Every structure is written in C-alpha cells, then in structure tokens.
Amino acid sequence: HQPLDRVPCTIGATAEVRQMLLDHFATEDWQVVLDALGVDDFARIGLRYTGPARFNDYGEPLGLWGVGYRTVKLPTGGSYVERVDHPLAEVTEVAELEDFDWEDPSDYDFAGAAEACRQRHPYQVTMAGYIAPFADLWDLFGVERALLNIALRPRLIEAVLERTMDYRLRQHRLLFEACGQWLDVTQVTDDFGCQNGLVMSHQHIRELFWPHYRAAIALAHEFGLKVYHHDDGGIGEIIPDLVEMGVAILNPIQWKCANMDLHWLKREFGRDLCFDGAVENQEILPFGTPQQVRAEVRKNIRILAADGTGYICGPCHNIQSGTPLENVLALYDEVRVSGSFT
C-alpha cells in the first residue's frame, strides 16, 4: 500500500496461449515474452515431490494421496488436466480413514525450493506454498461427493480436514524454514465462489474451514509472509472474514459474478487488500475487440488503483485458448499507457 510509479501487472495463461505468445515474439524463452509485455508477476516457486512413486492398478502415475488425473481436450484445441480418481469417493465413515495412507509431508525438495527463492528474490516478489483445504477435499472425494458430505457427513469432513491440514501445516513449516528470508508470499486459497454467489452457505464455510485458515495464516505470519488468496466467483460475502483473518492479496476479482462490485471492493477493503486480476475474461478478453479490452483495463485501473496503489492488473483468470493475440497485446500495452503515476 505504498505509492508506486506505475501499476504492476501479472499474467495467467493456458499452455496454448503461452505458445501463441512465444511464437509471436519468436522465442522459446518465456522470460522474453514477459519482458516484451512488461509483465512483473510473482516468482512462483514450485515444490518438487521426492517421495516414493505412486501408481494405480494400471501402472499410471498418481498424485498426492493417490489422486488420479487425466488430460481433457477442449474444442478450441486446448486442454486441461482434470481429477478423475478420488481415493475417498466411497468412504462414508470416520473409521475408514484409519487405514488410509496420509503420506509423509517431508517428501519434498525443500532445499531446491529455497535455492530457487534465493536466486529470484533480488529481482521479483517470491511466492511459494499452497494450502487449500476445500480443494484437498475435491481431490479426495470429488467435487460432488465433497459437497454432499459437507451437508450430510460433517464429522467425516472434519476428520479428513484434521488429517489433510496436519499434513499441510507440517509440509509448509518445513518449506518456510528452508526458504527463510528469500520468501515473501504464500497462498492460503480455495474456490468458494460460483457465478451467482457461494457454493455453500457462509455458515458451513465459517464452521468447517475458517479454523484451518486461521492456523495456516498464523503459520505464514509467524515467518513474516504475506498471504495471497485466490477465490473464483462471487465471494463478496466472505471477504470481510478473509480481511479479518489476515489475507493481504485477493485474486482474481471476477466482477461479473455476484457481490463483486469494484467500487464497493475498493471502498470497503482497499485499505487492507491488494487486488490482483480483474480484467474480465468470460466475455471481454476472449470475445471483445482490442478497444474494449483497453477500456476494461482503464476502468480497472481507475477504480482499483484510485489511490495510486493496491492493484496488480491482469486477467481475472487464465487467458483461455482461442483468445485473440491482439486482445492479449492490447491488455498489456494499455497497462503501460494508462498505468503510469509519474
């Protein structure tokens, strides 16, 4: 919340959009693209798994806790990796969790993450770590069963969250200890929103998830880290809770969704939150004209950076395959043109 010379910007993009930009700038180096667009962005440091290999009965590799994935092709030519195997999908009783392998949270290359942070910290804001209690439930149960169990079997959900969060907190303490002074930001994040509001009641979120959020945010603050929260959709109802718990950066600001008026967000929470994203990409970025994209960027800067700070401009989710190159270029050129405070 200090005054800036200009509005910083970020980019999120599918693999197809990244390749389109690499081709446009005639390079194989993504950093060349970022420099050409004027993108600042976070240095997002991953955490490499080093534990025992996991495979299903068909010899296919599995993720954490035995979650399986599949690449799904899109009509636009793009693709997404989707969760398809959910190891707790048929579990209905707490007792069934006792024989489940909750794995070892130390099975990661923490030293490698620390070295990556050390190298990038002089040049970028470094971000590492990802705690998402609700998303872990999607992985383990599948989205539909997770939501049904939240309504019908809250004790089962509480028991699973106790185990997943014990893993996450121990894993992230090791990460933060390793990265030390080279780490600036970590994610405590989820997706509680949809187009028309929350995916479940505010009461369910408050009772089931906020105790775990408080523990995760307290751990981040113990190491002097800022907390970044990604949450799609119409989440306006829970933003006061996020501020009270200590979230500092809110993404992606999907203002087309319910309860996400930009003027209200800046007026009510601009003293506490830095807003990240907000350039609309359900309609304007993929289907609008370059002029409409520029107008969208100017509007967001005018509202969310009205006091000369507190806004990171970028798409309000990954730029999707099929988005015209001209619109992507217009977005970042307009940040340069309209985002200067000097």
Image (cartoon, grey):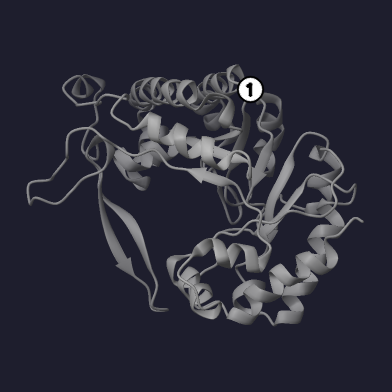
Closest to the observer: 70 or 235? 70
Residue 32's place in the image compared with 198, above or below, is: below
| Quarter where residue 236 is shown | top right
The residue at the point 82 percent across, 58 percent down is 301
Place of residue 328 in the rendered image (x, y in percent of width and height, measured from the top left): 63, 73
Q: Toward the viewer: 307 or 241?
A: 307
Residue 104 in sight from this viewpoint:
yes
Residue drawn at (28%, 28%), measured in percent from left and top? Answer: 107
Assign a secondary structure to mark 1: loop
Q: Residue 251: x and y, percent?
A: 63, 47
**Residue 8: x and y, percent?**
73, 53
Image coordinates of residue 124 in percent, x first then y, are 63, 44
Residue 191 in sight: no
| Residue at x 70%, y 25% (from the top left corner) | 244
Q: Residue at x 43, y 66 (%)?
A: 15
Q: Is residue 110 left or right of residue 262?
A: left
Judge from the rendering whether residue 319 lies leftward or rightward of residue 260; answer left or right: left
Q: Which residue is mark 1?
A: 224
Quarter where residue 168 is shown: top left
Give the image quarter of residue 28. bottom left
- Seen from the viewer's position, the closer of residues 261 and 179 is 179
Q: Is residue 16 left or right of residue 331?
A: left
Please tell me how many numbered marks the rendered image carries: 1
What amino acid is found at the position of numbered circle 1 in the picture? Gly
Quadrant occupied by the N terminus: top right
Circle 1 crowding by C-alpha within 10 Å: few under 14, some 14–19, many from 20: some
